[in-house]
Amino acid sequence: MSCRRVPLLACALCLGSAPLWAEPAPRDGVWRGLAGASLSFSSGNTDSSALLVNVNLTRQVEGAKTSVQAFANQARSKVDGDRETTANKWGVSGRQDLDLGPHWFAFVKLGVDADRLLELKHRSNVATGLGHHLIRSERHTLDVFSGLSLTRSVYREAQTINDKTDTRFSNTGVLIGEESSHQLNDTVSMKQRLEYNQGLSGDKLNLLRFNGSVNVAISKATSLSVGLIRTYNSKVPPGVKKVDTSLFTGLNVKLGR
């Protein structure tokens, strides 16, 4: 899939002149991050509207880091008088990292998401494992991590997955991922995260999620952003595509000092 090339390309472009190990970001217990929104409308032969809201926050103290991400995506279109919902989903996740040394850390991750088009009432996921700081400087970070996961999915209507028909499914699996952030200069920054959850039991659900964005500051408190969210779901209802892609542009507000 094309989204797998994005993190490697980002690192190649961004890290050429950066030190691989320097003073990390401030660990003063202050929440920092971005809150953004993207809104679009079109009219004519096709009437459509789309809204994406997202929040990314990080809090660091000596020996630990807490990160929280949340998003909501709503989109509708109207063709020849027929109105159709093309996106209706949301998600919230959080991760707690505990340093085991200058290079290694342990983590616990919790997440909940829902998707009306998939008839997914909610999906909860918990994972724990180990990670490694490959790059940790004031301007650039790159972490890799892996661990064990437990996923539970509840659908609004009965689904048939692996010859089992039910509204509730669960699986244990393996989580593998990487994430990075880069301050390219005083005004341009970028972040990306790639996670793959391989189900090993139960419904054997496989999930691949990529989320990346480039932000250009227009003031000390606001920035313009261009982002990509791409998701692969191996178990979807009939008539629904396994790959879902959202490309967005919008306005971000800086949170924290």
Image: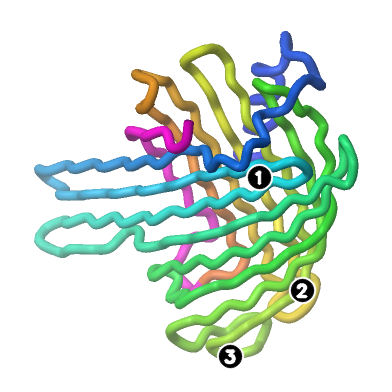
- The residues colored magenta run 237-257
Q: Earlier in the sequence, mark 3 or mark 1?
A: 3
Q: How would you rate the neighbour count of disc 2 (Cα within 10 Å): few for under 14, some for 14-19, many for 20 or more? A: many
The answer to whether residue 1 shows anywhere in this view is no
What's under tag 3, amino acid-wise?
A: Thr
* Mark 3 touches mark 1? (CB < 8 Å): no
**Does the magenta stretch mainly form a helix, a strand or a loop?**
strand
CB contact under 8 Å: marks 1 and 2: no
Disc 2 designates what residue? 172
Q: Residue at x 74, y 50 (%)?
A: 97
Dot 2 falls on a residue whose secondary structure is strand
| Type of amino acid at the residue the image marks with label 2 | Thr
Instruction: Identify the residue shown where x is 12% and y is 45%.
Output: 45
Is 5 inside the magenta-drawn segment? Answer: no
**Count of labels shown?**
3
Marks 2/3: CA distance? 19 Å
Amino acid type at mark 1: Leu
Please state if 38 lies on the left or on the right of 175 as rendered. left
Residue under pointer 3 = 165
